[in-house]
Image (spheres, grey):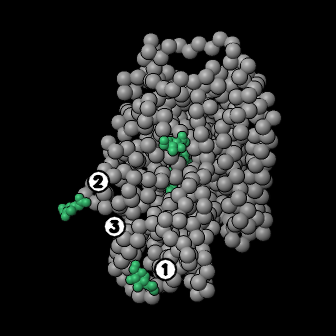
Amino acid sequence: MSFFLAFVFLFPLSLFIFKKLSPSKMNLPPGPTGLPIIGNFHQLENFLHKSFHNLSLEHGPVMLLHFGVVPVVVFSSREAAKEVLRTHDLETCGRPKLVTTKLFSYNFKDIVFAQHGEDWREMKKLVGLELFSPKKQKVFKCIREEESDLLFKKLTKSAQTETLVDLGKVLFSFTAGIIFRLAFGHNFHECNFIDMERVEEMVIESETNVGTLAITDFFPTCLGWLIDRISGQYSRMNKGFSKLNNLFQHVIDDHLKIAKPEDHSDLVSAMLIIINKPTKSGSFKITSDHLKGVMSDVFLAGVNAGVITMIWTMTELTRHPRVMKKLQEAIRETLGSNKERITEEDVEKVEYLKLVIKETFRLHPPAPLLLPRLTMADIKIQGYNIPKNTMIQVNTYSIGRDPKCWTSPDEFIPERFLNTSINYKGQHFELLPFGSGRRSCPGMALGTTIVELGLLNLLYYFNWSLPDGMAIADIDMDEIGALNIAKKVPLELVPTRHHL
Ligand code: HEM
Ligand SMILES: *[C@@H]1O[C@H](CO)[C@@H](O)[C@H](O)[C@H]1NC(C)=O
Ligand SMILES: *[C@@H]1O[C@H](CO)[C@@H](O)[C@H](O)[C@H]1NC(C)=O
Ligand SMILES: *[C@@H]1O[C@H](CO)[C@@H](O)[C@H](O)[C@H]1NC(C)=O
């Protein structure tokens, strides 16, 4: 809609002269010819990863586009991704400053959208210590096991009454239950100012707001500004943000009310202590904007990707009964019979589950374009010059389906990873669900533990079937989303308790 508005408003302007420097002269990457001012906006459909994929088939793995007047280079091959994220990691670890990311990151005081610099470094160090360190993992173990029990109880009830389960709902509740207790110290299952439904709505809404390109960012004049106001983008974004800010303030106020001075049990308490400590002048000062920026990161980056991964995994397993059967047998054989509870130790044991998750990441990377980066110097990739301040996107969706990297790329075959060393930790550039390099995801270990724990609970205790009258061919594979790409139609299955 905003693209269309942009087009209508800007078309008359396009009559003005708008000559780009000729790509061949500067050895810039090739790409589709755009319109003046609008650039290639009109050639992009709803899903950027798919539009980029189609365009790259024609224009190659290093492709230059223009969002309005802003140059964007899209990388769609393993080799190009490796050059960007490894060889030129340092020169490409900026993030573009966008209207939406500025707002939701409290003026870039967070990790995800912060510029490469002191704020980003200090915040990443602090959150690494308070949320991701191995020591914390042990402390957090009981939270995860409590949430597992809750999930198990819910599903057992549905199995007894043979009712359809919306897997998105229960898995969101499971994941958000864990992450928000770790980070915010709040149990949203029994919270008096917000419930899980509302939290889920807010996560999706905030992601959409951040992921929707504001026209302002891509046109130099006040025209873009005007279009965002007319199209409603501006007010949607501000309304969404103010809801989020209220929630964060609520959580902080609650902490202040019951503050125990040395309570380090969650990220918010830990940061509040640091904020209130006097610092030496000249040293880095953490403010309440940093705190809210990080809360915003956890909200936007911490929950949905894991939920999406579990849903795509269950979807592919349902579509491939052979894999489902093999996986359930592997899980039940490895873990033995009559387990009362899946523990964290179990997560490491089932090799086939890891292959299934890798295959899901290959076909359905939750964030197919990772997050946009910005070049901080002139660089050369695959022989092409890419100037400083170019926005860059790595299309892991294309790479995951590239026949040069994968045989039968469109088929779901977990065994393809059997005799390979390929993992998703950022050293193998054909599989990059968490990105790679300095800007890669710091929540990888936590995220995968939650995914594995959730799936083990689903698959050890229960068998899953489609509702009566529905066949495998009826499963809808459409996607939805902006930053994170999810399954559009909810996956609803009937659980049966499996007694071993
Ligand atoms: C399956 C789960 C997850 C997936 C697939 C995932 C994926 C990603 C991806 C693709 C990026 C962008 C990397 C890049 O730009 O190169 C990212 C960044 C990030 N993720 Fe995750 N993530 C997951 C879970 C988490 C969790 C649980 C947290 C924290 C609670 C988290 C926090 C972050 C942060 C803070 C960044 C920004 C890093 C930076 O810019 O320096 N993620 N994640
Ligand atoms: C990409 O190309 C395919 C096949 O030609 C087409 O069906 C699909 O609609 C295109 N998608 C986008 C987003 O352009
Ligand atoms: C569950 O599925 C497995 C095969 O995956 C099968 O052997 C078992 O009998 C099923 N259990 C129930 C209760 O249907
Ligand atoms: C992996 O290696 C084993 C033994 O080395 C072999 O039996 C098996 O067929 C191989 N599997 C694949 C998928 O290549």
Characterize the local packing of mark 3: few (<14), some (14-19) or many (20 or more) Cα atoms within 10 angstroms: some
- Identify the residue under disc 2: 421
Q: Is mark 1 within 8 Å of ligand 3?
A: no
Q: Of the residues shown, which amino acid type is indicated by label 3? A: Glu
Disc tally is 3
Q: Which mark is residue 462?
A: 1
Residue 430 is at least partly visible in this image: yes
**Residue positioned 39% across, 38% down in the render:** 77
Q: Quadrant of the C terminus?
A: bottom left
Closer to the camera in the image, 236 or 465: 465
Q: Of the residues shown, which amino acid type is indicated by label 1? A: Phe
Closer to the camera in the image, 299 or 409: 409
Characterize the local packing of mark 1: few (<14), some (14-19) or many (20 or more) Cα atoms within 10 angstroms: many
**Separation (CA) of disc 3 from disc 2:** 13 Å
- Identify the residue under disc 3: 351
Q: Is mark 2 within 8 Å of ligand 4?
A: no
97 is higher (above) or lower (below) than 316:
above
